[in-house]
Image (tube, rainbow, N blue to C red):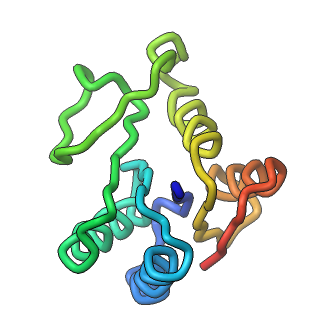
Amino acid sequence: MVCTFFGHRDAPKDVEKPLRDVLVELITQRHVTHFLVGEQGAFDRMVIGQLRALQDIYPQISSTVVLAYHPCEQKTAHPNTLYPEGLERVPRRFAIAARNRWMVEQADIVVTYVRSPAGGAAQFQRLAKGKGKLVLAL
């Protein structure tokens, strides 16, 4: 199973504990083995950090940072990245939204941290629900 994430760029630090609890449940109870993560804000950084720590405990899991911009245009410190095919034809200002739509399509489960109905996190939470994905809200 594949899981992806959407959350606010300015997610507070106190989200980390419930995030870790959900990740452990996904790994141990729902048998999720692969995680797709963006890299645009605090929530994404929390997810990446928690997944790195959990990979030491659960070696069967893997995570991929999905890039919104062509790898030649950005520096990334992540060892496992993916730039979805076709994204190079998307105008730069729409790249994050196009990448996020791609991540929803790939995922079986979507974990969200949404505190406002406006913005990208809420938009992609609604999209995931509309596509019948299992959406877990923090």
The x and y percentages for residue 32 are 48, 65
Q: Is residue 73 above or below residue 35?
A: above
Left or right: where 105 falls relative to 55: right
Q: Is residue 73 above or below residue 28?
A: above
Which residue is at the front of the view, 118 or 58?
58
The x and y percentages for residue 109 are 62, 61
Which residue is at the front of the view, 78 or 75?
78
The x and y percentages for residue 60 are 30, 65
Which residue is at the front of the view, 3 or 111?
3
| Numbered disc total | 0
Tell me which residue sits at (48%, 21%) in the image: 92
Quadrant, the C terminus: bottom right
Left or right: where 119 falls relative to 99: right
* Quarter occupied by residue 114: bottom right
Name the outermost residue toward the top.
89
Left or right: where 136 falls relative to 8: right
Name the outermost residue toward the right.
130
Left or right: where 15 falls relative to 115: left
Tell me which residue sits at (63%, 38%) in the image: 101
Q: Is residue 64 above or below residue 30?
A: above
Tell me which residue sits at (42%, 82%) in the image: 24
Q: Is residue 78 above or below residue 44?
A: above
The x and y percentages for residue 3 are 52, 58
Tell me which residue sits at (42%, 61%) in the image: 33
